[in-house]
Amino acid sequence: MNELDFSFSGLLRQRAGTVVPVSSVAAAAALLADTGGRAINFRGAGHSFGDRCISDGGLLLLNRLCDDVRVGTDHVATVPSGLQWHEVERQLNQNGRSAPVLTNWLGATVGGTMAYGGFGVSSYRRGAQVDHVRRVELLDAQGRQRVVVPGDPDWSVVLCTAGAMGMVTSIDLGTVPYQAYLEEAWIACQDERELAGKLLSLAAMRLDVEMLWAQISCEQRLIGIGRRSDVKQSVLPGLLAERSVACTAELRTWESWVAAQSARAFPRSRAYLWSDYVVPASRFESVFLRAYQLAYRPDIAAYARPRIRVLIVDRQFSPRSTHELNPVNFAGEELLFGIGVYLEPLLDRPDVVASARAGLSDLLAACVEAGGRPYFATWHEMNSEQAALAYGDNWRRARAALAAGGASPLINPGTMPPL
Ligand SMILES: Cc1cc2nc3c(=O)[nH]c(=O)nc-3n(C[C@H](O)[C@H](O)[C@H](O)COP(=O)(O)OP(=O)(O)OC[C@H]3O[C@@H](n4cnc5c(N)ncnc54)[C@H](O)[C@@H]3O)c2cc1C
């Protein structure tokens, strides 16, 4: 297995004709301007199902645009798209700043998360990473350099369209002040129903905290609440006791959290079958319980290391989304829940791989039926009808804007539902 023949999920096998690492915008522009009629795909860290980022016989551009982050006097940072988020955060911290939202796995590149939205535990207060972008530089289908800012006709589809508009080369990102400590409160739940009920009631309390999420493994079902601070102090147990919620609390440095979220190995012995489902609060419990039943079915639980993570976005506090296909851009909904289901079956158990895959397909159908939207893997698997159902007017407007903006079927094909 190498970069020419990449099958991250262990299910698809596609072989790029040519692989080209690029470390300058000029080199990327030259490649796009002269593809010889071949399809071209972009790759950052290659973790959004790397096999999907490849066209058989096509060009594969490996993004190595990794210059330093520049922080302006207005605290807006210019960030090259090839940098991984842990490196962006390290450089911002040196400048006394932080990214408003970080993904839970910090090995993803800026370009990779801009293609989908980018969510993390701080999304509770701050929405998606793309909601903090002020300016995008990209190379279009002909390799022409373009700058797109809010209000431009292409703004609504320049991000969150899986690279359909071209290669993002850098973004200008609003930042927040650096804070040295992170306080986390943990609420342990007996079972999945208790977790769903407690999470809904905590979300309804609209606590003045930065982070609210849940994580489930075979061993535990936990709700997490987080708050960053300049000083080493514990306030969450008191805040939760006022609402009769018992918890345990932990205080750590921000650096230790960043380091923990950056370390992750992906052994080749497993398939990585992951998808997220975004639903409004009223549909959360039913879709979550369905996801739980799939992930912890005995045949899957024994061989696929199932984990579920729930992220929450409260639109009352976070910025409004200006991108049509941002999965939390739901008209009229304030509280959105993202249910991430992560299955990693052993490749030498093809029966478990097949059941996990079939289960995620069922969940995709259940999510769309419940008025939700898939994120990542099963986002690619939707057909146009499902996409229209899930995204409604946003899908129709995005299609029109992509067509008007010159999106080409030869640019990053296979990464979003057919237009
Ligand atoms: C363990 C793990 C945990 C994760 N947790 C989270 C999480 O908490 N929140 C979250 O939001 N995501 C999460 N993700 C998903 C991750 O953010 C996405 O998969 C992201 O796309 C990965 O970035 P990448 O650099 O690997 O992208 P790649 O896999 O290289 O690319 C992803 C897509 O983006 C396109 N693309 C890449 N670079 C560019 C560019 N410069 N311009 C245009 N298009 C481009 C690619 O063509 C492809 O379609 C997680 C992933 C993993 C592996």
Image: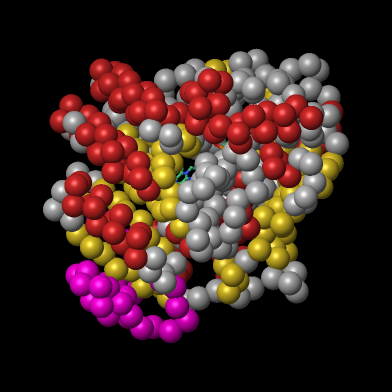
Residue appearing at x 43%, y 41% in the figure: 278
Q: Is residue 97 visible?
A: yes
Q: Is residue 295 visible?
A: no
Q: Nearer the viewer, residue 17 or 352?
A: 352
Q: Position of residue 246 (x, y in %)?
A: 19, 70
Q: Is residue 244 left or right of residue 367?
A: left
Q: Residue furthest front?
A: 332
Image vertical order of residue 105 relative to residue 244, above or below: above
Number of marks in the image? 0
Name the quadrant where ligand 1 sits.
top right
- Residue 115: name its quadrant: top right
Q: Is residue 32 left or right of residue 80?
A: right
Residue appearing at x 51%, y 63% in the figure: 317
Image vertical order of residue 143 relative to residue 129, above or below: above
Question: Does the segment drawn in magenta span residue 227?
Answer: yes
Residue appearing at x 29%, y 59% in the figure: 201
Q: Position of residue 135 (x, y in %)?
A: 75, 53
Q: Position of residue 207 (x, y in %)?
A: 38, 69
Q: Position of residue 378 (x, y in %)?
A: 45, 29
Question: Does the segment drawn in magenta span residue 249?
Answer: yes
Residue appearing at x 64%, y 29% in the figure: 396
Q: Nearer the viewer, residue 248 or 353?
A: 248
In magenta, the rendered stretch is 222-251
- Residue 176: name its quadrant: bottom right
